[in-house]
Image (cartoon, helix red, strand yellow):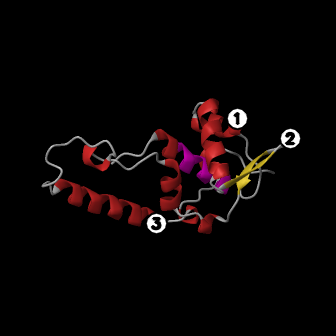
């Protein structure tokens, strides 16, 4: 299984916001820290805001901050909110055309593996992964 870049970036945005501990962060600085496209991060931040993980503060000195405490943000929930689907193979998709689906046992095994993957992510919160600002190359304020 591989997560989309969108989910990867969503987790990274949340990690950065958590490391800033209540300070507003901007898309520009987050893009610079990770070396990721600002336009792509804007889409990610919008999705995270709509899903209730970030709060956007508008205006000249605006930015983004966590909408919940890091210990209330489960990784599994973030992945569910950012992945377009979990169609690991054709038979998981609504337009499945696989001829052996009615007799195939692969779907059950893969479904079990996917459930285990998500269950593992559900055991972790953002608080379990929080880094320090220095880990992002940010010098602490003097």
Residue 54 to residue 31: above or below: below
Question: Is disc 3 placed on a helix, strand or loop?
Answer: helix
Residue 97 to residue 116: above or below: above
Residue 116 to residue 94: above or below: below
Q: Where is residue 141 in the image (x, y as percent from the top left)?
A: 79, 50
Please state which of residues 122 and 91 is positioned toward the viewer in this rendering. 91
Residue 107 in view: yes
Instruction: Identify the residue position indicated by label 2 in the image.
Output: 59
Between label 1 and label 3, give the one nearer the viewer.
Answer: 3
The disc placed on residue 28 is: 1
- The answer to the question of whether label 2 and label 1 lie on touching residues, with beta carbons closer than 8 A, is no
Q: Position of residue 63 (x, y in %)?
A: 77, 45
Inter-mark Cα distance, 2 to 3: 35 Å
Please state which of residues 21 and 88 is positioned toward the viewer in this rendering. 88
> Which badge, 1 or 3, is on the more N-terminal residue?
1
Q: Give the range drawn in magenta.
A: 9-19
Q: Where is residue 110 in the image (x, y as percent from the top left)?
A: 25, 56
Inter-mark Cα distance, 1 to 3: 30 Å
Instruction: Identify the residue position indicated by label 3 in the image.
Output: 122
Residue at image x 47%, y 48%? 83
């Amino acid at each position: 299984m591989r997560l989309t870049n969108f989910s990867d970036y969503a987790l990274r945005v949340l990690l950065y916001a958590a490391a800033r501990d209540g300070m507003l962060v901007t898309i520009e600085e987050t893009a610079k820290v990770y070396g990721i496209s600002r336009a792509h991060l804007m889409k990610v931040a919008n999705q995270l805001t709509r899903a209730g993980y970030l709060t956007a503060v508008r205006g000249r000195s605006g930015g983004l901050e966590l909408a919940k405490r890091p210990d209330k943000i489960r990784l599994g929930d973030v992945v569910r909110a950012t992945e377009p689907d979990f169609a690991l193979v054709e038979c998981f998709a609504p337009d499945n055309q696989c001829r052996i689906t009615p007799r195939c046992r692969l779907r059950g095994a893969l479904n079990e593996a996917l459930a285990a993957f998500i269950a593992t992510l559900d055991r972790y919160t953002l608080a379990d992964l929080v880094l320090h600002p220095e880990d992002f190359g940010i010098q602490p304020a003097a």
